[in-house]
Image (cartoon, grey):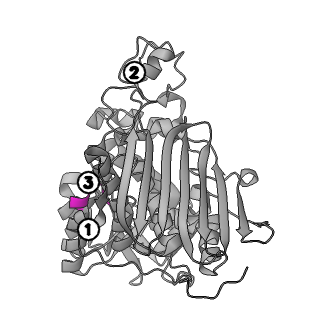
Amino acid sequence: MSNQQKRYVQVGVGGRAFMYTEAAAKGFPGEACLVGLCDNNKGRLDMMDRWVKKWTSADGGTGLVVPLYAHTDFDRMVKETRPDTVIVTCKDAFHDDYICRAMELGCDVITEKPMTTDATKCQRIIDTQKKTGRRVRVTFNYRYSPPRTQIKDLLMKGTIGEVLSVDFHWMLDTYHGADYFRRWHRNKANSGGLMVHKATHHFDLVNWWLSDVPERVFASGHRRFYTAKTADRLGLTRRQERCRGCPEFGTCPFGLDLAANKGLTECYLDCEQYDGYFRDRCVFSPEIDIEDSMNVVVDYASGTKMSYSLNAFNPWEGYAVAFNGTKGRLEHMCQETVYINGDGSVPGAIKSADTYIRVYPTRKPAYTVELWKAEGGHGGGDEPLVRDVFSHTPPADPYKRSADQRSGAWSILVGAAANQSMANKRPFRIAELCQNIGLPDYPAMPTGEEPLSF
């Protein structure tokens, strides 16, 4: 290992961890070195150890040997391995613990989205970062997806002038969408619900697209699809709490066979003995406490308004967003491929044939914009994100896609405010939940001062 390499440790080695582990272990030779792995599940630690050796072995060698630590030995791992940066990819509810402790121990942090799950934990991260001065990087890979970056480019150029309102609707299908109701995400204590865990992507996109921050949020939501009533309508009357061993498994359209998929078997089924976590729990369980249908209205600091919806039981996956500006309207429709998290397929890959950008200038003919090419996970965002995070010399970026704790906070606080709004049936201002966040380093946008002509 050279003196120029940054040293990384990672806490949390479940399904979302692979991209970061591989990048730190072998993706950037001379720039990055993986020196420690930490998790609460010994089986998954051993699994990731095998993968690291496989990725880094050559000419019959054993590959990189990385020390493994239990989650209770996090401080000892940092002391013994002396990392520059801690990568946090554990369960959402524990992000703040590891982010803050890493900074207190003198490390920078890279964290998966969402940065955390509620306003109290968010305030803790904001305060700890200010106290320690360490760097926090939040990995919003959707910013790096070429078509989403293209939207930012068009808005920055003033294609439709100053944006006055946004209509944004996200659809999860009955494969990927249903999966949130099987996993630990099904409980708000773990994930913050879909308003935080999933919608943090979406709220961050709008914040970044507009170069603006939210001020006030009003939301309404419920769970009406992933319920016992739906199971009854499907004729599922003998269901159990998990798919494995359930007498309805052969007839339930939502059954998940962990043993039929190599990745799910290795990462989850083979590791149940260590922590009792079941990856295939029933999507109709009474233990679920998150919504499957949500509507949100957001007021931005500039005066822009957004209407947003998220539904987790649609026939197709993707989104439709429209920006209404002083010079016209920009519409973007995007469909994504079907997948279940951790099944080995590419997450969030764009179906180009069903994706478009169309501009409607005021009192002029509409036109379709040729899409920027996107391949790979999260709409083609994964590869450029990883390069930007781990390379010592990332490409210059006029769109300022790199996100820190400020962007992380503004994105999750929309969801946290939405959760509070749904629970209390009133609007919530972001300032009621968290203070001293700071404004993100966003690119300049049209201000509405330029002359208009129609």
- Residue under numbered circle 2: 228
Q: Which quarter of the picture shows residue 365? A: bottom right
Distance of label 3 from label 2 (alpha carbons): 30 Å
> Which of the two labelled residues, at mark 2 and mark 1, occupies the earlier sequence position?
2
Find residue 213 and report its horizontal and vertical position in percent: 40, 71
Give the residue displayed 59% in from the left and 52% down from the top.
319
The earlier-in-sequence mark between 3 and 2 is: 3
Label 1, secondary structure: give it.
helix
Q: Residue 290: where, in percent of width, then height?
A: 35, 39
- The 10 Å Cα crowd at callout 3, few under 14, some 14 to 19, many 20 or more, is some
Q: Which amino acid, mark 3?
A: Phe
Q: Left or right: 153 with respect to 182? A: right
The mark found on residue 431 in the picture is 1
Q: Which label is found at residue 11? A: none
| Magenta residues (range) | 116-121
Residue depth check, mark 3 versus mark 2: number of the one nearer the observer: 2
Residue 224's place in the image compared with 229, above or below, is below
